[in-house]
Amino acid sequence: MRHIISILMENEAGALSRVAGLFSARGYNIESLTVAATEDPSLSRMTLVTRGSDQIIEQITKQLNKLIDVVKLIDLTEGPHIEREMMLVKVKAAAASEARNEINRLAGIFRGNIIDVTSNSYTIELTGTGDKLDAFIQAVGNEEILETVRSGVSGISRGDKSLSL
Amino acid sequence: MELTGAEIFVRCLEDEGVEYLFGYPGGAVLNIYDAIYKQDKVEHILVRHEQAATHAADGYARSSGKPGVVIVTSGPGATNAVTGIATAYMDSIPMVVFTGQVPTNMIGNDAFQEVDSVGITRPCVKHNFLVKDVKDLAETVKKAFYVATTGRPGPVVVDIPKDITAVKCEYHYPKRIKMRSYNPVVKGNKRQIIKAVDLMMSATRPMVYTGGGVILDRAAKPLTEMTRKLGFPITNTLMGLGAYPATDKQFLGMLGMHGTYEANMAMHNCDVLIAIGARFDDRVTGNIEKFCPTAKIIHVDIDPASIAKNVMVDVPIVGGVNNVLKEMMALLDESKLSPDKDVLAEWWQQIEEWRAVDCLKYDKDMESGLIKPQYVIESLYNVTKGDAFVTSDVGQHQMWAAQFYKFDKPYRWINSGGLGTMGFGLPAAMGAQLANPKATVACVTGEGSIQMNIQELSTCLQYGLPIKIVCLNNRTLGMVRQWQEFFYQGRYSMSYMEAIPDFVKLAESYGHVGIRVEKPEDVLPAMEEAMGKYKNRLVFLDVVTDQAENVYPMIPNGAGLNEMILV
């Protein structure tokens, strides 16, 4: 099962390596990992996507909680939640070509923004679930894509529930 | 008044009540060593290798219950200490290790004697710190002691760059520390404890299985009281020996790979297993698929991550062993509940049948003229009246010591159970001897292990540590050889120790007493001499033992606890 674990941790040097080291030392896998400081600069928030049986996920959350720098964590997938990922994708778009119009239309359909334009390319910013980003890549086609960069998943609980001190 | 970082460091140790600082000087810690020179509250013990500093601090911690404290220099000082840190980590020993570091402006420049100590030690410490500002030094030291000694204990490393030890600031050592990210649970959940007690009362074939957690939480007394009150059979893990008196009738001996037949059979056949401060290690469970097939399991542990890690449990209780045991006792007293005596009697009858197998029997007559290693341990037990602190290295001798030295008191059995570090025994004995200057401290070792930290004989001379080294010299890496005999058709690859030194001369050259023992009838007199005539000297007893002797009983790889190989 895929799980999204959200972690509040001390914003200290080395905190990230403790989490990454824990996963490699114990043989857990990380699908994606994002981290940045929160509105409270002494705290970082990390969103980690992993896969495993219930028993492994239980161990992962327990082992993460054991890290001294980890203040609090939740498994977002245990309740209703929203996940988002941002992608920047640079695609071929030769001037006055049909492809150029097509990309423009596709970006509109996927509610993306074209954030950079040259005579030969568009760069599109797209936000959504991983599936949506995958679908966009498929719709554009690999041959048209010059490069992509994805942020990894960020997530938050729905409703009043929040991960804070 | 403003103090330098080095002075602050020493003041912190004084205020923390540190008696001994085990260490070795070097470039990055010269300021600190200068501050050590100028005070007399903390005694520095100069080892001969940094690994020994960590093991000595470890032995001090295990035998005294107080954290062990180490200082080493940067680079090789730190890397040499890593084995000892990992040893302490695996056995959850409270220890604070200070490593010198190159000056902050040099970090990352591949400076002389620079390593990323925080990075290297990260996977084998409970936590570590790099001090970047002298103003943080005192608080960081306090945090290090707090983290190392609370919750599930463990080693903490504090990396101190050289420039931090030279600059000055106001000294203030915090009395207490609060960390928002670290609040270990010590009190067990009341409802879970009630559930556990109910389950214990319903048991027809109960079994108590306890580990190092009972030792670490100094909980031998409540454990013994409760087990006696209930009349249940009890076994201890290798790490937990001494938590329950070994000569008591209710004690079934150690369990696991080289545990007793009765302990392992009782584990396998029990219907309620009460696991306390033990972590279901693979050397204990054997094949996990076959482990305790009919048991409901109660598991008390301070570390939530230890619960349901290897084995699913029915009643998990997160909390300090001491607290939980006391609460259980209070419940038992209050409710006046007690187990059904007749039902228990039937269970005991079965256990006595297993016990009658006498799984630890060996050739006591020794008519062949070869000394049986088991006899050496029994002699040590008899001569020291079971009251010595016994450290061990790793291998056959370790198992024999665990099987044949009957520990009636806790905190006296000191060995590297988790990491299995050869070379642990002698330096650990130094720590134990310093913590217990009047006690007899024996180091049970082999001719392989002792050579891994033999240089510490020099430290022992310097500080007058009258350790009794009992070397079971069988001229082979015994445990390796045993596995090669059983599972590799006797291909003894590299398990033969060629060119073994003359340990008697070696001990003498270090200024100690060496005695070689070659005949069974000389074992006891030699031990008596070591404890009597040479009471105040370090004695190296080089005991030539039967090379062919193996450790029995044994659970082979992949087998269950009920599938032991007996003698």
Image (spheres, rainbow, N blue to C red):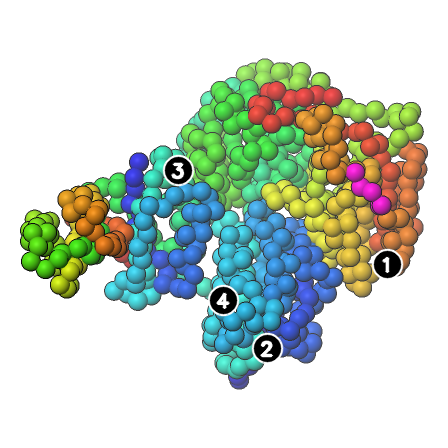
Spatial separation of the CA atoms under disc 1 and disc 2: 35 Å
**What residue do we see at 8% from left, 55% from top?**
A97
- Quick one: SS at disc 1? loop
Spatial separation of the CA atoms under disc 3 and disc 2: 47 Å
Residue B50 visible here? yes
Q: Nearer the viewer, mark 1 or mark 2?
A: 1
Residue B20 visible here? no
Residue hosting label 1: B510
Q: Amino acid at mark 4?
A: Leu
> Label 3 marks which chain's residue?
A
| Label 4: few (<14), some (14–19) or many (≥20) C-alpha neighbours in 10 Å | some
Tell me, yes or no, whether the highlighted magenta stretch contains residue B81.
no
Q: Quadrant of residue A120?
A: bottom left
Q: Which mark is residue A56?
A: 3
- Quick one: SS at disc 4? strand
Spatial separation of the CA atoms under disc 4 and disc 2: 18 Å
Residue hosting label 2: B7
**What residue do we see at 33% from left, 43% from top?**
A50
> Label 2 marks which chain's residue?
B
Residues B233 and A22: in front is A22
Q: Which mark is residue B17?
A: none
Q: Are marks 4 and 2 in contact (CB under 8 Å)?
A: no
Q: Amino acid at mark 2?
A: Glu
Q: Which mark is residue B130?
A: 4
Quadrant of the rendering where the C terminus of chain B is positioned:
top right
The disc, 1 or 2, on the residue closer to the chain's N-terminal end is 2
Q: Amino acid at mark 3?
A: Ile
The disc, 4 or 2, on the residue closer to the chain's N-terminal end is 2
Residues B151 and B521: in front is B521
- Quick one: SS at disc 3? helix
